[in-house]
Amino acid sequence: MTSLPTQTNKKLGLVIDLDTCVGCHACVINCKEWNTSGYGTALSDQDPYGANPVGAWLNRIHTFEVTPMAHSAKPRGQGVGEVIGTAGEARVVHFPKSCLHCEDAPCVTVCPTGASYKREEDGIVLVDEDKCIGCGLCAWGCAYGAREMDAAAGVMKKCTLCIDRIYNEELEEIDRQPACVRTCPAGARHFGDLADPNSDVSVLVKERGGFDLMPEQGTKPVNKYLPPRARTDLGVGRSFEAAEESTENADGLLGWIDRALSGTTRSKGAR
Amino acid sequence: MADREIELSEPLGEKHSTTCYMCACRCGINVYLKPGENGEKSVRYIEGNRDHPVNQGVLCAKGSAGIMQHYSPARLKAPMIRVGPRGSGEFKEISWEEALQTAVDWMGPLKEDPKKLAFFTGRDQSQSLTSWWAQQFGTPNYAAHGGFCSVNMAAAGIYTIGGAFWEFGSPDWERTKLFVMFGVAEDHDSNPIKIGIGKLKKNGGRFVSVNPVRTGYSAVADNWLGIRPGTDGLLILSVIHELFRTRQIDLDYLIRYSNAPFLVIDAPGTAQHGLIARDKNGVELIWDSAKKKAVPHTTKGVVPNLTAEVSVTQGRKKVKARPVFTLLAEEYSKAEYAPEAIAPQTGIAAETIRGLAAEIAHVAFQEEITIEQEWVDMKGEKHDRFIGRPVSMHAMRGISAHSNGFQTCRALHVLQVLIGSVDCPGGFRCKPSYPKPYTAHPKPHARNAKGDTGPLAGPHLGYPHGPEDLALDDDGNPLRIDKAFTWDAPLSAHGMMHMVIANAHAGDPYKIDTLFMYMANMAWNSSMNTRGVIDMLTDKTEDGDYVIPHIIYSDAYNSEMVSYSDLILPDTTYLERHDCISLLDRPCSEPEAVVDSIRWPVVEPNRDVRGFQSVVLDLGARLGLPGMVNEDGSAKFKDYADYMVNHERKPGIGPLAGYRGKDGDKAGRGEPNPDQLERYKENGSFSMTHLPEDALFFKHANKSYQDFAVDMGFFDAPQPVTFNLYLEVLQKFRLAAQGHGDVQPPDRLRGRIETTFNPLPTWYAPFEGADLGERTEKEFPYHALTQRPMAMYHSWGSQNAWLRQIHTKNPLYVPSAICDAKGLEDGDWAWVTSWHGKIKVEIARMEAVNDHTMWTWNAIGKRRGAWALDKDAPEATKGFLLNHLMNELLPPRKDGYRWANSDPITGQAAWYDLRVNIEKAEAGAEVSEPVIPAQKTSDKSPNEIRYGLEWTK
């Protein structure tokens, strides 16, 4: 059994915006690309050109459909005001998932060798591969399925928050952030200290109603997700002045045009 | 407890900046090379270049998987000549000298009858070189892949506003408040759209997606309109109907920048009917309300009329004429465009259509934005500010790839003009060297400058102004093998690559000797009717020779097309080559800056391969093509890099616009600079020239921009654009169809041209469904289409060891309504039929999709043995192509003729017109059908990859 720090100085983590993620997999592949040559052993791929290609990944996107039910969403046509979902209207959700660097991380406490640990300095959960015996208990313990065994090396792999980027003095300061955050084309991923209530990520979580993934598990994840922004149906609250004459056909329209051009009625555009 | 010590600052290695080519987006990348244990450098990491204007530092999944593409086991290793039958995959490696000599032996004699060579390039980013090469050879048979991609969008845009989406323009992401995206468009323009959607959402803007499928970008849209395929044109015209009805039109903008006030001759039955009235000098006339007379539209200080029915003198006659705007108002005020009328066909509720129109109008006119910046228009009038209508739009292949695609794309561009949002703050902005009116583009050329051999008189591809510009011989027969620029597809501005193999096989309009192709998987996912195309490629004459005698192909990978070719010229990977993203080709500029870029060999090839562009120049020299040899017959250019620096299209204008002149301080025009490529590399492999502040918007009519464009060498004189709400070019073809003029269409096409060549945007039912008549609803009630996954680019991506773990196979996603009607469940196998073919596929149930539309991912399906994948790879056993359900021709008509499965105006392949049915398959093997037998391969693929292990601890 391995113990957790009673408190960490920082809570470094990710804030992932589900309103903006388009499921493009940039974060997934860039993570693999960085980390296969980074902290710990390579992220191997088995049968890469064969019938069942599988590999070790630190970040994956789950794509699924949801259809809001009547009790949790407003029916179509009653969208005056803001709604998140419309009853019966299916949508696709892209859900990126990697280690959430939990405060009460069961993957750490189940580790029999002390390989799995949470850093006191910044709260990052790491695997010390020299101590890892590949027993896989931590992956069973993780509530989120966020750890993957590397089949070639027989050691457990997981998100390190790119610890070899965020403190890397070889990199320009602006690049000292996780690869997934730096590469995300839609700007849906944010990195920072969630222990600091004034950090950009904490402010974002507050403003956008960021939430914990499966809080009932009691793991106190550091990473947060931002829900879809509220939206309105098209045309809600967009009323136009009543037309001054018949709108039934082109003749009424042309009359309006003539008056518009002669300055006797309002026309669009600045003249 | 103190934290354990970790090495946190591992160096990354040497950083080299170049340009990505994992798709056509052209992002800037930094490639890090790091020595391994043996001291040999390999690629440690590829990241987006922060300074690059296209991707601003980000990089997508494809770009991030560049390592696996570069080290792919499917890379070709050496030139090869076929030793087994076509399609077998049996080759022998030969030397480059032997390969080049073979190519010269085949092509050299064809210089005497140049049309016997057909040179077609696929997703080629060097078209300014390849088209020039074909021009110098003298063959009329050249084009790239635009004809089967998005020519409808490009051509409709150029004819209407002098620009179009993606390469030619983009939304003003910083300022737009309403973004409307139509159709499948996730790959063009990949990263910029994702960056843009992120910005839009951050700024509180609204994103509306009109798309039968709610995946990808549509998944995060604020409003999703799950439209029925092929009906986007109706929806757009209905929005226009609503804008007219509610008077939400930018009249001032229309008068200033469009042909709304131009007078159209109203003389039915005459050869002038529908043409624009002109003065003696050919300048278009408008009606001056103040002076009550017709004056040239260029006249200053007039009060243009938009509604009068007037009488003007044309030649010696008085004729009636009416302003373009009146025709528009009359047409789109018709009840047939009312939301209620089109709701049943589109599947979009009338209230939603009205809501969309109201939203567009509200944002355009109630949320106007201004930028305080003085500027001067082309008439010399000074303006105090730029006025913006912050509504922007984007569309690409989704609405293009229909037989009504050109008119639908026209409608979309016209909609943007009506609300005054083209090239204004917050709207759609052209990227320099666009806008460029169609009249400033070349016309098509298909004849040799002198006699029947030697260089062509001009570029192959261009924009016809009327029937007289078609590529027809004196007897009215097609000059080109693909029949581009004929009555079948008069405005086929990108050529019709998808018709080449069928026509060459049929010897219609003539036989060819050598088919020379680059980077286009025409034997597989890039052709309709894949099985039929394979048969054409392998068909033999009675003498036992192949019907298409020689096929030369260049590719970097062992694609399906390789096995059907005779001589293989192996290309490099994108990290091993020189390239230029040239302003002479499709620019990669941004709205506020002129941008071009290069690729250069960041890594030297470790195989006997050569960059195709260098090979083409070598072949050109060996064939003695003008411009590619010195006076003594020696090669003029050492390689493509030499050409990029030293070739001049005209004095001072070359492939690269940056760092010209002896000192490298000139942009656009300037003498060649021997250090040019070094200067590009120092600058991240791109050059950027900012527009003056007063030139940033309204470029079509902005004097400062037009002067800048002339300085840069885009034009030799200003080329302002008048937006063509009414496209007179189409009316000229219509008049011909009615019997006017010397150049006449065949009788069989007259009716079709009259219907479809409407000079005002129009909608007609897609041909495949219309042609099948009653059979459509009874036998093929559904639509089927493909879209490209964001993580892949055509067949390149689906063999990539990392990317293929995301999409290893492609199920057919079937709407729940159809599943329930047909008793289909997730994971079932089903037969999908069209009038042409039948495929067996695995299905997946889906809710967030139009009720009548099933879809799948594009280009995942592979032939067994291709792309260095194992023969039992799911891509080959479970993946599939919808292409087997399509034919390049439609069913025979009553008169016996078969129309191309294409847009009648541009010839664009109508991929998305496909109509199908689906039935559960009997129990049996879970293998997709048809099964194409495996090709032989010597590719050796590893069973395991541990990339980067050498650098880890």
Image: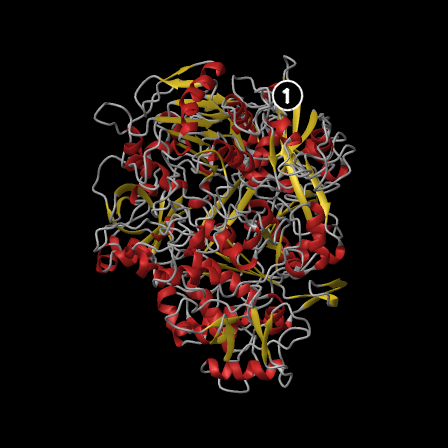
> B880 or B950: nearer the eye?
B880
> A220 or B96: nearer the eye?
B96
- In the image, residue B261 lies at what x, y percent? 56, 72
Which residue shows up at 39% across the image and 57% down it? B404
Which three-letter amino acid code belongs to the residue tagged 1? Trp
Mark yes or no: residue A75 visible.
no
- In the image, residue B108 lies at what x, y percent? 44, 23
The quadrant of the picture occupied by the C terminus of chain B is top right
Q: How many marks?
A: 1
Which residue shows up at 49% across the image and 75% down it? B321
> B631 or B284: nearer the eye?
B631
Q: Chain of mark 1?
A: B
> B561 or A217: nearer the eye?
B561
- In the image, residue B56 lies at what x, y percent? 67, 43
- In the image, residue B645 lies at what x, y percent? 66, 30
Q: Secondary structure at mark 1?
A: helix
Q: How is the image coloured?
A: secondary structure
Which residue shows up at 61% across the image and 76% down it? B304
- Answer with left or right where residue B313 lies relative to residue B372: left
The image quarter in which residue B117 lies: top left
- How many other residues sit within 10 Å of disc 1, few (<14), some (14-19) or many (≥20)? many
Examine the rendered structure and indicate whether residue A146 appears above or below residue B5: below
Residue highlighted by disc 1 = B951
- Answer with left or right where residue B77 lies relative to residue B663: left
Which residue shows up at 45% across the image and 64% down it? B759
Mark yes or no: residue B208 visible.
yes
The quadrant of the picture occupied by the N terminus of chain B is top right
- Answer with left or right where residue B233 lies relative to residue A16: left
